[in-house]
Image (tube, rainbow, N blue to C red):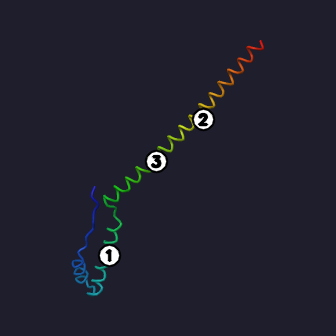
């Protein structure tokens, strides 16, 4: 979607203000002020390049976070496997000990 850009015809604004009874200096000053306000608004608009850069940065940030999350999951899985293996060894040792004493 294209952004609407407001262009101000300062000469037309100045003439309308003078026709409405404003002094020439007042009409010119108001027209110039309106033009400056329009220019300031245009400077704040995001361009396609701005959005593409933001999209790239966001995508990289998301990918980094996904990798970090995957690494934490793998580390948790490894800790769980070590714990299960330890419990299995302990259970086998206990079973062997009980069978020898019986």
Residue 14 horizontal side relative to residue 65, left or right: left
Instruction: Please name whichever residue, 12 or 59, is drawn nearer the observer in this view of the structure.
Output: 59
User: Picture coordinates of residue 50 (x, y %)?
Assistant: 34, 59
User: Picture coordinates of residue 57 (x, y %)?
Assistant: 40, 54
The residue sitting at the top extreme is: 102
In the image, residue 102 sits, relative to residue 55, either above or below, namely above
Q: Which mark is residue 64?
A: 3
* Secondary element type, mark 3: helix
Name the residue: 53% across, 38% down: 73
Quadrant for residue 86, please give it.
top right
Disc 2 residue crowd, few under 14, some 14–19, many 20+, Cα 10 Å: few
Which numbered disc, 1 or 3, marks the residue closer to the eye? 3
**Spatial CA span between label 2 and label 1:** 63 Å
Say which label, 1 or 3, has the lower sequence index: 1
Instruction: Please name whichever residue, 49 or 42, is drawn nearer the observer in this view of the structure.
Output: 49
The residue pinned by badge 2 equals 79
Disc 1 residue crowd, few under 14, some 14–19, many 20+, Cα 10 Å: few
The residue pinned by badge 1 equals 36
**Spatial CA span between label 3 and label 2:** 23 Å
Q: Quadrant of the C terminus?
A: top right
**Spatial CA span between label 1 and label 3:** 42 Å
* Secondary element type, mark 2: helix
The residue sitting at the right extreme is: 101
Quadrant for residue 89, please give it.
top right
Residue 43 horizontal side relative to residue 64, left or right: left
Residue 47 horizontal side relative to residue 58, left or right: left
In the image, residue 60 sits, relative to residue 46, either above or below, namely above
User: Picture coordinates of residue 15 (x, y %)?
Assistant: 22, 81
């Amino acid at each position: 979607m294209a952004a609407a850009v407001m262009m101000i015809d300062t000469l037309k604004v100045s003439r309308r203000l003078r026709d409405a009874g404003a002094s020439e200096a007042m009409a010119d000053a108001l027209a110039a002020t309106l033009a400056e306000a329009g220019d300031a608004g245009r400077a704040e608009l995001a361009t396609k390049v701005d959005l593409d850069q933001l999209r790239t940065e966001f995508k990289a940030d998301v990918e980094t976070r996904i990798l970090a999350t995957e690494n934490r999951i793998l580390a948790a899985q490894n800790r769980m496997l070590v714990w299960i293996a330890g419990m299995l060894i302990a259970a086998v040792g206990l079973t062997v000990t009980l069978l020898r004493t019986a």
